Image (cartoon, grey):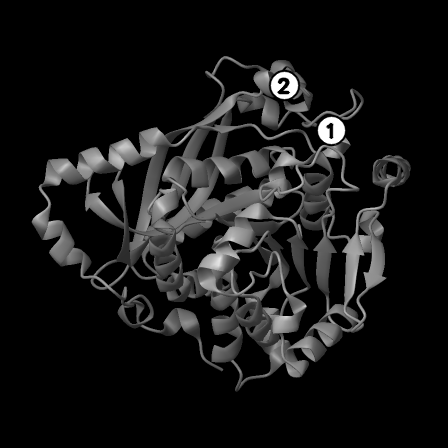
C-alpha cells in the first residue's frame, strides 16, 4: 500500500494549470496593479452574514452554546485553513492571489462575529433571531500562516507542519466529537467568504466542531465561472494529498468533508483519486487509515456522470456519502446549459448508463449513499429555485448539522425513505419534520446524563 505522506512533497504537489502560464501573466502585470485588482475583487463581494438558525435553535429553550467554553471568547471564531492559492507577497499576513500555486499553505483564520462587542448572551439571542436585519456579519480579521508544503519548503514531518497538526489535535482534544470537518467552498468565493462560510457552520455546532476550510483559488467573479472550474480541477491533487496528511498526522477519529456547489469539482475527484490510488491494497485497511466519515455534497455543481464514476472509487471507504439536491435549482440549471450536461445537484437520470444506474442502486441500498431530495413545495420558507439551501434554510441546515454532529442516518434524523422506478433509494423531508425534530431533541435530552 502506498504511503502518501512518505511521497516527496515536490512530486505530490507539482501539478499544472492548463490553458495559461501564470508566471508569464504575472510578469506582464505591475505588482501594484495585481494588488489593487485583488483588493477590488474582494471589496466587490458582500460580507458573510450569520446564516438563519437551524431548526433546533429556533425556540427559546435551546441555546446555541450549552457551556461556558464558547462564552470565554464569544465574538471570535478561529478555524483552520489550507490553500493552494499563489502568494503575491511573502509577508505577514500573506497576500493570496486568485491563481493556483504549486504549494499548500496551512494555518489559522481568525474571524469575528459583529463588531467585537457582542457578549455570550447577545450572541445567543442574535443566533436565534428570525429577523435577517439582526444577523451580524462574520469578518475575517487575520490569516495566521503556519506551514508551507512544496518543493524546497516544509514537508509533513517538519517542525512547522507538526506545529499545525498539533494545533488541530489540541482543538480536537477539547471537542466532544473528535472529528475534523473539511469545508470546500463553491465558485465566486473570495478568501473572506470561504472562511466566513466555514465559520458560521462551526458556530452553529455550538463552537464544538473542529473545522478546516480548503480555500481553492476561485477567480471571485460570476463571469469567470469556467476559470473557477479549471482552477477547481487543478486543485484536485493537492486536496487529495491534504486529506491523506490530515488522516496520517492528526488525532481525528474521522475526516469529514462538506463540499458546496463547485467545491464538488475538487472533493469528488479528490476522493476518487484517494480511492483509486490505493486499489492494490486491502480496502478494509485503506478505510481504517483514511478515516473518511461523513462526506456531504450540498447542491454539487459537478457533472452527474463524472460524479457517479468518482463515487464508485470511494463509496466503500466512507461511513456515509450524502448528496442534497433541489431539482428546481436555477444555478445548476444554468450550469447544465453551459456544460451541456446535467449537474449532480440537479441530475438527469436519463444521462446515466445502465452500469451507472446499477451502481447508484447498490450504493443507496447496500452502502451509506444518501440522496436527499430537498423539495421546496414541502420545506417551508425555501425559495423554489434555491441553490444556497444548505445554509439559508433552517430545515436543511438542521439536517446537515445532525448528519455531522450526531452521526445519524437519515431515518434517525427524521427523514422518510422513497425509491425511484429504478430502485435507487432517496430521502425526503416529511411535512411534519419540525415536529419530528422536536421529538428527537426531547428524547435525546432524556437520555443525556
Determine the image quadrant of residue 19. Answer: bottom left
Residue 300 as seen in the image, left or right of residue 422: left
Viewer-proximal residue among 56 and 166: 56
The spot of residue 285 in percent (x, y) is 60, 77
Q: Considering only vertical position in the picture, is 87 above or below 149?
A: above
Question: For the residues marked 2 and 1, what is the alpha-carbon distance in whole angstroms?
Answer: 11 Å
Viewer-proximal residue among 168 and 140: 140
Q: Does the image show residue 246?
A: no
The spot of residue 68 in percent (x, y) is 65, 24
Residue 179 as seen in the image, left or right of residue 157: right
Q: Does the image show residue 330?
A: yes
Residue at mark 1: 57
The spot of residue 2 in percent (x, y) is 45, 80
Specify the farthest residue to the bottom: 280
Disc 2 residue crowd, few under 14, some 14–19, many 20+, Cα 10 Å:
some
N-terminal of the two: label 2 or label 1? Answer: 1
Residue 219 as seen in the image, left or right of residue 241: left
Residue at mark 2: 126
For label 1, the SS is helix
Residue 418 as seen in the image, left or right of residue 51: right
Q: What residue appears at the point 40 percent right and 44 percent down from the top-left corner? A: 188
Q: What residue appears at the point 70 percent right and 34 percent down from the top-left corner? A: 54
> The C terminus lies in which quarter of the figure?
top right
Determine the image quadrant of residue 154. Answer: bottom left
The spot of residue 110 in percent (x, y) is 42, 32
Q: What residue appears at the point 65 percent right and 20 percent down from the top-left corner? A: 124
> Number of marks in the image?
2
Amino acid at each position: 500500500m502506498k504511503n502518501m505522506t512518505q511521497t516527496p512533497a515536490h512530486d505530490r504537489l507539482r501539478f499544472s494549470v492548463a490553458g495559461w502560464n501564470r508566471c508569464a501573466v504575472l510578469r506582464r502585470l505591475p505588482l501594484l496593479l495585481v494588488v489593487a485588482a485583488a483588493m477590488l475583487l474582494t471589496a466587490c463581494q458582500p460580507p458573510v452574514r450569520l446564516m438563519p438558525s437551524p431548526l433546533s435553535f429556533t425556540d427559546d429553550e435551546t441555546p446555541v452554546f450549552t457551556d461556558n467554553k464558547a462564552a470565554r471568547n464569544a465574538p471570535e471564531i478561529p478555524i483552520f485553513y489550507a490553500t493552494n492559492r499563489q502568494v503575491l507577497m511573502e509577508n505577514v499576513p500573506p497576500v493570496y492571489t486568485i491563481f493556483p500555486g504549486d504549494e499548500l499553505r496551512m494555518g489559522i483564520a481568525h474571524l469575528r462575529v459583529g463588531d467585537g462587542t457582542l457578549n455570550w448572551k447577545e450572541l445567543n439571542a442574535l443566533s436565534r433571531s428570525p429577523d435577517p436585519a439582526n444577523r451580524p456579519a462574520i469578518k475575517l480579521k487575520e490569516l495566521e500562516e503556519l506551514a508551507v508544503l512544496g518543493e524546497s519548503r516544509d514537508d509533513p514531518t517538519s517542525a512547522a507542519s507538526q506545529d499545525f497538526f498539533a494545533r488541530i489535535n489540541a482543538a480536537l482534544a477539547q471537542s466532544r466529537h473528535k472529528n475534523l470537518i473539511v469545508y470546500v467552498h463553491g465558485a465566486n468565493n473570495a478568501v473572506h467568504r470561504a472562511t466566513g462560510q466555514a465559520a458560521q457552520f462551526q458556530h452553529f455546532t455550538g463552537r464544538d466542531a473542529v473545522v478546516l476550510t480548503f480555500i481553492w483559488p476561485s477567480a471571485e467573479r460570476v463571469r469567470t465561472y469556467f476559470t473557477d472550474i479549471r482552477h477547481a480541477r487543478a486543485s484536485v491533487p493537492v486536496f487529495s494529498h491534504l486529506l491523506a496528511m490530515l488522516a496520517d498526522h492528526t488525532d481525528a477519529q474521522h475526516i469529514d468533508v462538506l463540499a458546496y456547489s463547485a467545491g464538488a469539482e475538487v472533493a469528488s475527484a479528490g476522493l476518487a483519486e484517494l480511492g483509486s490510488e490505493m486499489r492494490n491494497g486491502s480496502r478494509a485497511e485503506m478505510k481504517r487509515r483514511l478515516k473518511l466519515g461523513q462526506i456531504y455534497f450540498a447542491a454539487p455543481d459537478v457533472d452527474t456522470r463524472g460524479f457517479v464514476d468518482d463515487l464508485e472509487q470511494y463509496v466503500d471507504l466512507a461511513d456515509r456519502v450524502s448528496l442534497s439536491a433541489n431539482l428546481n435549482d436555477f444555478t445548476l440549471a444554468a450550469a447544465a446549459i453551459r456544460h451541456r450536461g446535467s449537474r449532480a445537484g440537479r441530475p438527469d437520470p436519463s444521462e446515466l448508463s445502465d452500469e451507472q444506474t446499477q451502481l447508484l442502486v447498490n450504493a443507496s441500498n447496500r452502502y451509506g449513499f444518501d440522496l436527499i431530495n430537498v423539495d421546496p413545495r414541502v420545506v417551508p420558507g425555501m425559495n423554489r429555485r434555491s441553490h444556497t439551501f444548505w445554509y439559508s434554510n433552517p430545515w436543511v441546515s438542521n439536517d446537515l448539522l445532525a448528519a455531522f454532529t450526531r452521526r445519524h442516518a437519515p431515518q434517525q434524523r427524521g427523514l422518510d425513505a422513497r425509491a425511484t422506478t429504478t430502485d435507487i433509494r432517496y430521502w425526503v423531508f416529511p411535512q411534519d419534520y419540525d415536529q419530528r425534530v422536536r421529538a428527537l431533541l426531547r428524547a435525546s435530552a432524556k437520555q443525556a446524563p
